[in-house]
Image (cartoon, rainbow, N blue to C red):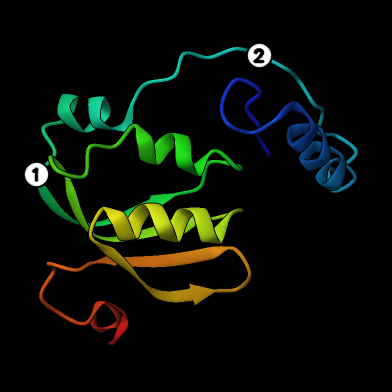
Amino acid sequence: MTTATNLSLSLQEAEDHISKYKNKLNAFETSIEFSAPAIRLTTILDQNKTPKVFDFLSIDCEGNEIDVLNGLDLRRYRPKLILLESRDHARDIMYLSSEGYFLAKKFGTIDLLFASKDSGKNPLDFFKS
């Protein structure tokens, strides 16, 4: 489990998240705090020469979805499908809708699958065997 304290997640939200899941740690697991540099997703894609259009992007960032999405230039990189672990469905749906995506499917209570409106096919066809 991770949580960031320097992004859009408030300190209270971070503390609530930690309290909620800390009791799930095994006896041998510990909690530590550390700092790490943040790199925009667009920079990572640039550095790895990622094609402009690619099939699938999964984002699971412990409550910092909007910060990761804001670090992705969806005019330069266009994943056909985005699976997002979302803690704020309304905000994330509104944001991705404004970027040309639609909510294709909800999995469980927090995972949302978005498809690019210009992908040209039913996104659920990707899951058929």
Residue 109: percent from the left, percent from the top? 63, 69
Quadrant hosting residue 98:
bottom left
Q: Is residue 27 left or right of residue 73?
A: right
Q: Quadrant of residue 35?
A: top right
**Residue 20 vertical position relative to residue 30 in the rendered view, above or below:** below
Give, as a three-letter code, the residue at label 2.
Phe
Residue 69: percent from left, percent from top: 38, 41
Q: Residues within 10 Å of mark 1 (few under 14, many from 20)?
A: few
Residue highlighted by disc 2: 34
SS for tag 2?
loop
The residue at the point 34 percent across, 55 percent down is 96
Q: Amino acid at mark 1?
A: Pro
Q: Position of residue 45 (x, y in %)?
A: 21, 33
Image x and y of residue 58, in percent: 39, 53
Vertical position of residue 62 compared to residue 82: above or below: above
- Pick the residue in front: 127 or 113: 113
Residue 67: which disc?
Answer: none
